[in-house]
Amino acid sequence: MPDATRRERLVRVLKTVTTQPLPADDEESLFESGLLDSFALPDLVSALEQEFSIKVPDRDLNPRKFDSIASIDKYLQDRAN
Amino acid sequence: MRAFLHGFGMHAPERVVSNAEMAARVERTAEWIEGACGIRERHWAAAETSVADLALAAARDCLARTGVPAPSLGLIIVASGSARPGFPGPAAEVAARLGLDSTPAIDVPMASAGSLFGMVMAAQMAAHFGDVLVIGAEKMSAVIETAALDPNTAILFGDGAGAVLVSARPGPWEILDAVLHSDGQYRDSLAFDWSAPLRMDGLSVILQAARKLPSSIQEVLTRQKVAAADVKVFLLHQANQNLLVRVAKSLGVPAERVYSNVARYGNTSSASMLIAAAEWSQANPALGPVVFSAFGAGFHWGALLARGA
């Protein structure tokens, strides 16, 4: 079950690293849609670390973990548990 | 065991490939190329030029600048990820063409981070072998021309060579500390073996580099109790202007503190850090802490802290 507050915070973070409109489908690839490129991705990870007060370890720096709103939300959920 | 950097050298082939020329070959615009990577032009060697030819030119420049005659060298280390496969590697040829017939010469077949790894090896070996000449030399144009040019990678690379003389004799910059790291789980993220085009997972490479370059720099600075703000210059592998700016931001230093010549040479892989050092050192740099750092295929990465005195 998605956490509405967490998703809202995630969307807010995404809007700080891209000027493009977010996809309507949470499963849509942020990379294939052109919303995130290789240089926006490190910015996104840093912004997530700041917003959620977490440290993303190097072993988790896999682009697939940050490929969609749904996958990022799942990663944040796993980190919270 | 103390080690010092005595001076640098470099060589770039004469032919300049502009973004306009590259744009026509990859069906993009010159503006798109510069926006994607900050590169405006790169140097490409002639077809008959080898990695050893490039390395030799940088070696001679470094020896001339430091005033060290080739027969005084105790060891030569040549880093290259683009030397032709097979054996021997370019190090033996470089030594022979410098007139040396018994000086040991070691190849480091490592792209991008090769010259940094060579410098750290040299610092450890200088007390035993004497003056060590470390060279990074690359003919990346041959790598990208093994297949139809891929716009995402072909625009990045240039040819060239850089060199540094490392010695246990006191010199202008003392090496204070260094860290090296490797993580082979990402070996397929950036790879080339001459049988297929260069493979680069740009998302993974940039995500890892943007984290590992500043973290290795911070690791060595913390160990030596030096603040990033006090470092006079950061001499990094010149991969991409956007990456250099991000590293500066991560370290909390002005972008100008990270030396950049990527716009004029492109990414020359293991040669780039020493080409940057050679240019920087010619401009009578300020004394104080200097950081070298590189990240590349493997992944291999690390940082070296020196101090000018």
Image: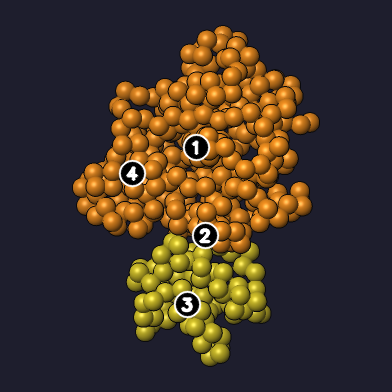
Chain colours: A yellow, B orange
| Residue B280 seen by the camera | yes
Q: Are marks 3 and 2 on the same chain?
A: no
Relative height, residue A52 to residue B306 (above, below): below
Q: Are marks 1 and 3 on the same chain?
A: no
Q: Residues within 10 Å of mark 2 (few under 14, many from 20)?
A: many
In this rendered view, identify the residue nearer to me: B182 or B209: B209
Q: Residue at point 20% right, 47% down?
A: B24
Q: Residue at point 36% right, 77% down?
A: A20
In this rendered view, identify the residue nearer to me: B169 or A14: B169
The quadrant holding residue B43 is top left
Give the residue number, with chain letter if any, for mark 4. B41
Q: Amino acid at mark 3?
A: Thr
Q: Which chain is disc 2 placed on?
A: B
Q: Residues within 10 Å of mark 1 (few under 14, many from 20)?
A: some
Do labels 4 and 2 touch, CB within 8 Å?
no
Q: Position of residue A43 (x, y in %)?
A: 51, 68
Question: Sequence-wise, which precedes: disc 4 or disc 2?
Answer: 4
Q: Position of residue B192 (x, y in %)?
A: 42, 40
Q: Residue at point 51% right, 75% down?
A: A72
Q: Amino acid at mark 4?
A: Glu
Give the residue number, with chain letter if any, for mark 1. B279
| Residue B298 seen by the camera | no
Give the residue number, with chain letter if any, for mark 2. B246
Q: Position of residue B118 (x, y in %)?
A: 60, 33
In this rendered view, identify the residue nearer to me: B241 or B185: B241
Give the residue number, with chain letter if any, for mark 3. A16
Q: Amino acid at mark 2?
A: Arg
Q: Which chain is disc 4 placed on?
A: B
